[in-house]
Amino acid sequence: MNDMLKTTPDFTIEEAQALLAQHFALDGSLQPLDSERDQNFKVNTGDGRCYILKIVNGAEPEIESDFQTALLKHAGENAGDLPVPHLQPTLSGENLATTTRRGIVHRLRLVTWVPGTPLAQSDRSDGALHSLGRMLGRFDASLKGFMHAGALRDLDWDIRNAGRSAGRLAYVADLQDRALLQRFLDRFDERVAPRLPMLRSAVIHNDANDWNVLIDEDDHDRISGIIDFGDALYAPVIAEVAIAAAYAGLDHPDPIGAAAAIANGYHAEYPLLEEEVDLLFDLIAMRLVTSVTISASRRAHTADNPYLAISERPAWALLRKLDAMNPRFSTAILRKACGFETVAGARAVASWIVGNRKSLLPLLDRPAAAYPAALVPYGDPAHPMTVSSAAGRPHDAQSVWEEQCRRAGVELGIGPWGEARTVYSGEMFVSRLVEETRRTRHLGLDLFMAAGTQVHTPLAATVASVEIEKDPLGYGCLIALRHEPDGCPPFLTLWGHLAHEAVSRLKAGDRLEAGALVGEMGAPEENGGWAPHLHLQISTDTSLAATDILGVGEERYLDVWAELFPDASTFAGIAPEFYDRSGRPHEDIIRQRKELLLPNLSISYEKPIKFVRGEGVWLIDDRGRAYLDCFNNVCHIGHAHPAVVDALARQAGTLNTNTRYLHDNIVAYAERLTATMPKELAVAAFANSGSEANSLALRLMRAHTGKENAVVLDWAYHGTTQELIDLSAYKFRRKGGKGQKPHVHVAAVPDSYHAPAAWPLEEHGRRFAENVAELIAAMRARGEAPGFFLAESVPSVAGQVFLPDGYLKEVYRMIREAGGVCIADEVQVGFGRVGSHWWAFETQGVVPDIVTMGKPIGNGHPLAAVVTTREIAASFDNGMEYFNTFGGNPVSCAVGLAVLDVIEGEDLRRNALDIGNHLLAAFRTMQERYEVIGDVRGLGLFLGIELVSDRRTRAPATEIARAVANGARQRGVLMGTEGPHDNVLKMRPPMIFSKRDADHLIAVLEETFEAVLARAG
């Protein structure tokens, strides 16, 4: 370069005008332009045309001039619309002319003037920088396939030669500045230089500094041209973006944002590769390192030259900014700008967590969504809790929060991801990315509970680090866990504001199984000075140290942080409905129900619940609280079971019609359903509800027997039609009922718990059956006979009553001998709920004449069935058509088949038996401690606990039963009360109920009994 400075042309304006006329036949005024080694003139002709005359440095090798000429020619021929200088031929038709001065040959080039204002003299808006990126991308794309020997030159400005800056460090006088440059050089040598040879290379402009980029004078968001191709060469493609970004970042309040805008525009025209973008931050820095070291070297060898120092001061300022940044965050921003994941695998991690959320164990003592929860008011800058926290008064903040929880019945406070907060008042929250900006957006999930609350990992992990962060308003005890689940990229979870006890208990490398203790929420004295809570955060970048993970981020880059540090709510078990509350207010729904619906349509609970979603064993209300569903036995295999949903959607999307047309599904389902029955029960019919099924059973009975007399059990319920209400003592004997009809004969409920004490247990079945014999005898005395006996195989509304051994055998024998048929109502207890058998009647060793099914048959889809013998079916075939518009339709049968598939495929009968036995054992243990528990009964997942005020008299403890059911509801578990006195706790959880679910139910019942009995005195 020093030699070239000795051969810099120094023609006068008059001499340059003469050359212009001689070689290009142009006459005009000339204006000198700044140049470091050549001589440039702006030419204005009299007819309004404008050019640039370049007189090339005499020391410039011809190959370089030829290269630039060939480059401009190629661009003109292949992208004539690009706003770059276009070659003007000499009078002889050549691209270059020559002249000699003092024995030095100079070449002359004339190109068109590109109008515009240098970007250096304009605000660099995001729009302008995006436009610059697009312009450079278009230009480089136009050079694809172009090559010239002159492009293969050796320049210090070649990004591949950035390491040469180490040889110029001696010219940097300040030791701190020299150390700063060394840090970038070390990174370059370690992680960039070895990868550069593998990157794509091409001919690029290589010097898109803000003086070589022109902006439209009328639209400052649009780049109007690119000039000065003197540094063009063959280099890595990504260098083009890095160089432009380095200059655009000078004196820019958000240099990485500026680089992102350029990269985004460039990528739109000339798609970048991930491995290129991953090096962009370092290449930006190394362009600046090259610039400041070259300037320092030249200052040592050259007299004062303002051009050389044109960007040195802002370059140093930018280097200091970049040095303070975490390169991983900057790279994440740049990757996001180009449409890539912020870090490889980030989206897969978020997807895996959502897809596997059901398998994650509770983070707290019970699932987080099961707690009554509320938002912590940190989003309100004026709230006393926020004010106290920002002022460093954590105990005051905690007092405010505790009082708010007490008034609202809240047990869990939630601080959401992405919330804007003013509590981050320390210097540590000043942005290193954007000038005069604070980090205010919360990037973790806060769970507020009492100090000492234990927190557990929902997923197996390895401890990555355990440390104490001592900064005020820092994390206190901070633990990082590394998770590597099958089918998912590794990710980290960060657990902050914990008690210090974990430091002596855990160390890096320890293995934690799912559900293992991570730590305890710390008090303010050890958690960084906050009201007690857990800061939980996910990092998809596993290379970050725990203290490098941003807990609070800039609003401008919230979309980047969302991918790098995704919301941990799903991981922690927070339902999305907690944040996204929609639909009508409860009060409006209640009012409109009263206005629009039958007034005797009841609502459960004094404070009604509005459920908006079901999933597995859980029901989620409109506030995001999850309730363990131990009551709604309609969703037999779990709410919204994907197999059922898929079967319904696929068939509904194909065809739904009625049984007058042929279809595979109805016969396939009838075949599968009857295969679960004793061989005598071989003919099926389909309906839409249990009530319809029971009504159809009565039609079958009448056609076969010609009789009407019914024998039913006391306190039974069989359906909602009038003829079924007349058979349901639970209805006709209560308020609004019309009493017992003459054809209805009610037998005593065969409840062994309330049997006379004198009866031997082994005789209960026969003794209770004697009551049925008496009813038959009374009918016979009037010259009548029973038409049928109808009973649930396990009376449910009567209080989960399990029939004594031999009862149905004796009753069925007597009914049949009297000419009647036996109907088993399996609407509530069928489909394997008892675990030991498919059907509860099988536990009595009997075969009914007719079986009715509903509720669980379709897992929430309206479907019901009747199965009977061929003999009864033949009697029903009396010439009158049986047709049910929707009964047996293809969609319903597809759903029914899916339910059977799941019961069999997931071995849910065995699960019901195993989990049921686990629950019964726990309930009986509770019975030993609580006198109020008179009886525990059940089989499989059909369970009852009868509460009494006196075990000797067995007087019902109705109020305590209601209090326990309501207390369980308050604790997030749904159960009912049944029996003539509403003193039996009724539990019928989905068949997929797990031991974990069962243990949660047990824990809630224990807690509830303690609380209720303590209040009762």
Image: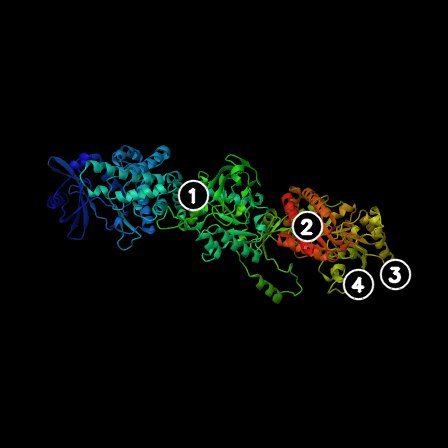
Point out the tag, 4 or 2, that comes first from the N-terminus. Answer: 4
Query: Mark 2: few, some, or many residues within 10 Å (few <14, many ≥20)?
Result: many
Mark 3 falls on what kind of element?
A: loop
**What type is the residue that disc 3 sits on?**
Arg
The answer to the question of whether label 4 and label 3 lie on touching residues, with beta carbons closer than 8 A, is no
Residue 2 image-quadrant placement: top left
Query: Mark 3: few, some, or many residues within 10 Å (few <14, many ≥20)?
Result: few
Mark 2 falls on what kind of element?
A: loop
Q: At 26% from the left edge and 54% from the top edge, which residue is drawn?
A: 217
The answer to the question of whether label 2 and label 3 lie on touching residues, with beta carbons closer than 8 A, is no
Query: Looking at this view, is 742 or 1017 the one in front?
Result: 1017
Residue tagged 2: 988
Residue tagged 3: 782
Alpha carbon distance from label 4 to label 3: 16 Å
Query: Looking at this view, is 167 or 715 the one in front?
Result: 167
Alpha carbon distance from label 2 to label 1: 47 Å
- Image check: 214 left or right of 456? left
Mark 1 falls on what kind of element?
A: loop
**242 to 625, vertically: above or below:** above
**What type is the residue that disc 2 sits on?**
Arg
**What type is the residue that disc 4 sits on?**
Lys
Q: Nearer the viewer, mark 1 or mark 3?
A: 1
Q: Quadrant of the C terminus?
A: bottom right
Mark 4 falls on what kind of element?
A: loop
Residue tagged 4: 741
Point out the tag, 1 or 4, that comes first from the N-terminus. Answer: 1
- Image check: 83 left or right of 560? left
Query: Mark 4: few, some, or many residues within 10 Å (few <14, many ≥20)?
Result: few
Point out the tag, 2 or 3, that comes first from the N-terminus. Answer: 3
**What type is the residue that disc 1 sits on?**
Thr
